[in-house]
Amino acid sequence: MTLIEVLVTLAIVAVMATIVVLGIGGPDRGLTVQTEANKLAERIGLAADEAMVTRRPIALVWDSRGYQFVTPAADGSWMPDTHALLGQRHDLPRSLTLTAAEPALIDMTDASLIAFELSLTDASRSATVFFDGLNVSTSSGAPRS
């Protein structure tokens, strides 16, 4: 087995583990700012892995109410990504708002060249998702008054 085969196998295992982690729990577990931030972070990590392993362009499209990942169509427009967890738009619970200083479309095709942060807020709490081109992390903000 060559090094490339080992790396591809590890990447596939990582993607599958991410899918399992995202699938754990259900709608009854109470969606909070931190759970939504963790979900967004996991999906950003999955998209970065997909872009690296498959070498296909992937971009994050977001607005204040939700997000999804897209790929370029043949006509140059953007269409939902073919991966089930990435291509489906994720709408946030009504109490949450997504904000960022980044453009509404973040191209993750060469993830190692980008870094960004997105913030999720509700009436009393906030959480920030950081992506440095390699790692994704979340940070909880203090309760807002």
Image (spheres, helix red, strand yellow):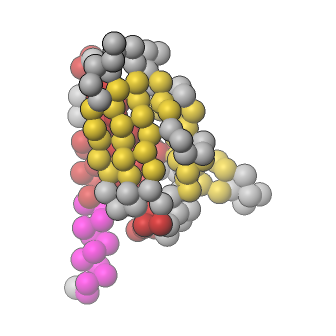
Quadrant in the picture for residue 118: top left
Vertical side of 123 occupied by 6: above or below: below
Q: Nearer the viewer, residue 123 or 66?
A: 123
Q: Which residues are magenta?
A: 2-13
Q: Please, which residue is most extreme toward the front here?
A: 145
Percent coordinates x, y for residue 134 in the rendering = 35, 62
- Apparent side of residue 20 relative to residue 133 in the rendered image (left or right): left
How far across and down, in percent of the image, does residue 21 sit?
A: 24, 42
Whether residue 60 is situated above or below residue 40 in the rendered picture: below
Apparent side of residue 93 relative to residue 139 in the rendered image (left or right): right
Residue depicted at 25% across the width and 84% down the height = 3
Identify which residue, 39 or 2, lies in the foreground.
39
Q: Is residue 67 left or right of residue 103?
A: left
Residue 7 place in picture, x, y as percent: 28, 74
Relative to the observer, which residue lies in front, 8 or 112? 112
**On screen, residue 112 above or below 79:** below
Residue 12 falls inside the magenta stretch: yes
Is residue 29 visible to the viewer in this orientation of the structure? yes
Residue at 52% x, 63% y is: 109
As drawn, 64 above or below 48: above
Residue 143 part of the magenta-drawn span: no
Q: Position of residue 140 (x, y in %)?
A: 27, 32
Quarter in which the N terminus is drawn: bottom left
**Can you name the residue that lies furthest to the right here?**
75
Q: Is residue 19 visible?
A: no
